Amino acid sequence: MKKDRQATQADRLKELLNDSSESEQKHTKVISITSGKGGVGKSTISANIAFMLSEMGYKVGLLDADFGLANLDIILNTRVKQNLVDVLNDRCKLEDIIIDINENLKLIPGDSGDEIFKFKDSILAEKFLADADELLGDLDYLIIDTGAGISKANQAILAESDEVIVVTMPDPSAITDAYATIKVCSKFLNTVNLLLNFTKNQKEADLIYQKISKIADSNIEDFKLFYLGNLSRDSLITKCSQNRLLFAKGYQNSLSFFELSEIIRNLIEKLEHKLLTSKQRGFAVFVRRLMDRF
Ligand SMILES: Nc1ncnc2c1ncn2[C@@H]1O[C@H](COP(=O)(O)OP(=O)(O)O)[C@@H](O)[C@H]1O
Ligand SMILES: [Mg+2]
């Protein structure tokens, strides 16, 4: 019985991977959040964006791909014991590691991207992809909290994403690092989104965007740096982190909530324009394509 089910899952996966398939697969919009250096707010922003989208009624997966420094579980006040690498090593099942944060939001603990790619030809990978399709096939959004920097694994994730958000902050070294990340992304993407965190106000944020955008325009061909918005430096965010709360959950009247809502509105609007031309694909196909990059 179980074997039959697995066989059916495998068949369905083959069908999904086949571009000519007529299957009505859900399109999971993959949004990766990255930065040139650490400590700029990627995990905080990933968790709060994922939560806000889930509250809007979307089905959301939040993939922790900040290898080694995984801390989304802390931000979400839960505890992760095993991750995707344990699943691929057959130490546990995918359903054992996925954590339901609320009805619409699932935390998917990842690990080193380099580890995951090693399994691309393994039989366990096929089983994993079939399970992923069953458990995560209905996601509207997959938000990926990537590690800082531009490792090969990170680049693969960014290249396969529908949208990439580069987070940075006003200090000059962070801006230089962000520009370096944008430049690498421009090799495989024709647009990247900029989110400025820890800003004093919107005016400061606008000026920084204009500065980076000007450099990008004159140095990178056929590329658009899209401004998603800014998040001000707010002691509420630090306080929420310390108390393992999401500002998007308990503080709907805060400036941070307002600013993040704007960012999400811009993001959804951008995606809606793009979806008309993009290919349908779900979580399992996304992971398969990632693996195939290695
Ligand atoms: N806009 C902000 N205002 C104040 N503190 C912030 C803001 N954004 C992030 N933080 C704090 O900065 C620290 C680093 O954020 P984190 O999300 O862990 O960064 P990263 O994932 O990029 O390393 C956390 O303690 C977080 O609460
Ligand atoms: Mg982080």
Image: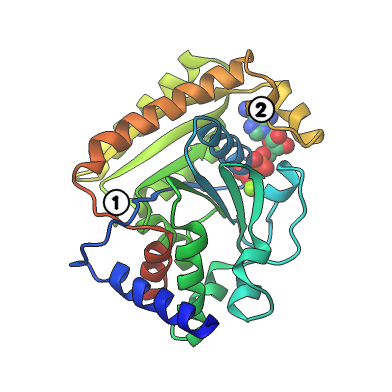
Residue furthest right in the image: 243
Give the CA separation, mark 2 to mark 1.
33 Å
Closest to the observer, 247 or 146: 247
Residue at x-position 75% and y-position 46%: 74
Residue 53 lies, with reference to residue 19, above or below; the image says: above
**In the rendered view, would you say 12 is above or below 4?**
above
Hey, which quadrant is residue 233 in on the image?
Answer: top right
Q: Residues within 10 Å of mark 2 (few under 14, many from 20)?
A: few
User: Residue 181 appears at what percent x and percent y?
Assistant: 43, 49
Residue beneath the point at 39% across and 50% down:
28
Residue 97 visible in image: yes
Looking at the rendering, the quadrant in which ligand 1 lies is top right
Q: Is residue 127 left or right of residue 186?
A: right
Establish if 177 lies above or below 86: above
Quarter of the rendering containing residue 169: top right
Q: Is residue 145 left or right of residue 217?
A: right
Amino acid at the residue labelled 1: Leu
Q: Position of residue 288 (x, y in %)?
A: 39, 70
- Quadrant placement of the C terminus: bottom left
Amino acid carrying label 2: it is Lys
Tell me, yes or no, whether the two marked residues, 2 and 1, touch with CB atoms within 8 Å.
no
In x, y percent, where is residue 149? 52, 55
Residue 227 shows in this picture: no
Q: Secondary structure at mark 2?
A: helix
Q: Position of residue 38 (x, y in %)?
A: 62, 47
Marks 2 and 1: which is nearer the front?
A: 2
Front residue of 7/51: it is: 7
| Residue receiving disc 1 | 189
- Which mark, by number, is residue 249? 2
Badge 2 or badge 1: first in the primary sequence: 1
Alpha-carbon neighbours of circle 1 within 10 Å: few (<14), some, or many (≥20)?
Answer: many
